[in-house]
Amino acid sequence: MSVRTRFAPSPTGMLHIGSARTALFNYLFSRHHRGTYLLRIEDTDRARNTEAAIQAILDGLEWLDLRPDKPIVFQSTREARHAEVAQALLASGRAYLCFCTPAELAEMREAALAEGRPPRYDGRWRNRDPAEAPPGVAPAIRLKAPREGETIVHDLVQGTVRVANAELDDMIILRGDGTPTYQHAVVVDDHDMGITHVIRGDDHLTNAFRQMQIYQAMEWEPPRFAHIPLIHGPDGAKLSKRHGAQSVVEFREQGFLPEALCNYLLRLGWGHGDAEVLSREEAIRLFDLDGVGRAASRMDYAKLTHLNAVWIRQADDGRLSTEVAKRLGRNGAPAPEVLTRIRALMPALKERARTLNDLAASAAFLAHAPALPLEAKAQALLTPAAREMLQELAPALAATDFTPPALDASLREFAALRGEKLGTVAQPLRAALTGSTSSPPIDAVLAVLGREEVLARLRALA
RNA sequence: GUCCCGUUCGUCUAGAGGCCUAGGACACCAGCCUUUCACGUUGGUAACACGGGUUCGAAUCCCGUACGGGACGCCA
């Protein structure tokens, strides 16, 4: 049977970084085995689901290039089927009606906790005649779970995990209002969709036991499970706002490339020898569940940033220029000649950037009119003497061919004539032209700016 | 509280009983390169949680302890 995986987020917020990794693993696993990767939106909790959240998930997956192979399945559209299966279980005696009220259940839970017992349903309606039902209570359907023995999950990541059935209670599969609970809907959908491998966060590990019981009650063959460890913040605690970005759109806004994020997420909790920088193709070729670790891993923004720099250096110059223009163009699109300059200097610019935002900042000087803002360090470099020197340099530059080699030669000659080191000339010049003390090589900057612009900027300084 | 899972440099990991004097990557430190900043490059600091077994031999297998995480809803 060919592999079929699914990513099944509930649309209650943004696409979280942990969810993104789950999607990635599902995608990679299915691709590696030449299978199919599906998306199911678990939107059965109407009160919490929003259209915006669904869109956010879709946008995030789109950006990460993790689009499903087939149309999206919305769980909410399958409620009739969920109810049908629950009724079948009821009819076959594998489930029963429970007339407990929410208040009654809450009481049961509190009492158990107070006595130090685990909070579980006591099975009071398991063998009770529905004829004894109190009036006005819409019954829920509970699975008649086995009381003895144990339930075993052969997890592809966690290994064989077993739990005594006495630890599990009779879970509700269909609510009093006829809607399915999560555990039930997941099982029915995964079965109907022909899912062969359920890859998800290990916060679902204990759910696997409950779900296994439903598979057994329906006599369905369960899928293989793979519970991957969670991602924690740098301090080992659950990832939260104070740790920084957690939704994929935030990473996008901070100037990360999707391939860098995917690369980082892949290496978080998975390893293959010394492989660090992996393209999508390589990831598909190498990825398998046996390389997934069992321990939670911590988010390391520094390493993500490093990987982003690596991917920026490898990225297409045209694409990067477009991203930079987008960022520089917040107050109107950059002029055509500015775009040309950005594109021309991109090979040198991308060598120095760690994020697209860095890249845009480092290209900003290309867009400014002659009088550009000076950083403090640049300001300090432009002493009266330096300014004077630049005015003397101007005629020399004016007479130079504006190609990097010629400019380089010209600068060296100018410096030599004055008995100065090249840096003594280049640094003030850089400050004057870029407003900064760091930039691509000065000859490249000069060539890209062009004679006219260079002279204009030097004049503006006089 | 109960059940389940985990623990190799600060972080991500390699490691399937001898290849381990524990490897790589990020970060950090020092040097080189250099017109700046980066890139690159050379070197360095840094880990098998602890305690018992098993074995000729254990980071690797077993048990316990500690610490961390997860799950215990008519949420998903």
Image (tube, helix red, strand yellow):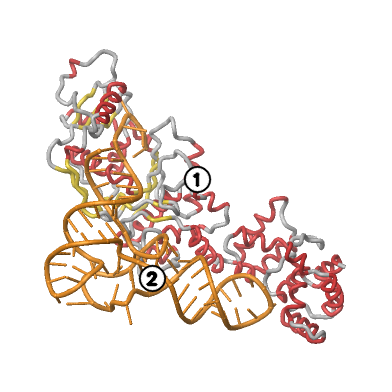
Residue A318's x, y, as percent? 62, 64
Kind of residue at disc 1: Lys
Going 53% across and 49% down the picture, which residue do you hit? A249
Residue A63's x, y, as percent? 51, 53
Kind of residue at disc 2: Asp
Q: Nearer the viewer, residue A9 or A79?
A: A9
Going 28% across and 21% down the picture, which residue do you hit? A104
Residue A144's x, y, as percent? 18, 32
- Disc 1 designates what residue? A241
Going 67% across and 66% down the picture, which residue do you hit? A343
- Disc 2 designates what residue? A274
Going 17% across and 42% down the picture, which residue do you hit? A164
Residue A224's x, y, as percent? 25, 51
Find residue A407 and name its label. Answer: none
> Which quadrant would residue A348 be assigned to in this image?
bottom right
The image shows residue A363, relative to residue A254, as above or below, that is below
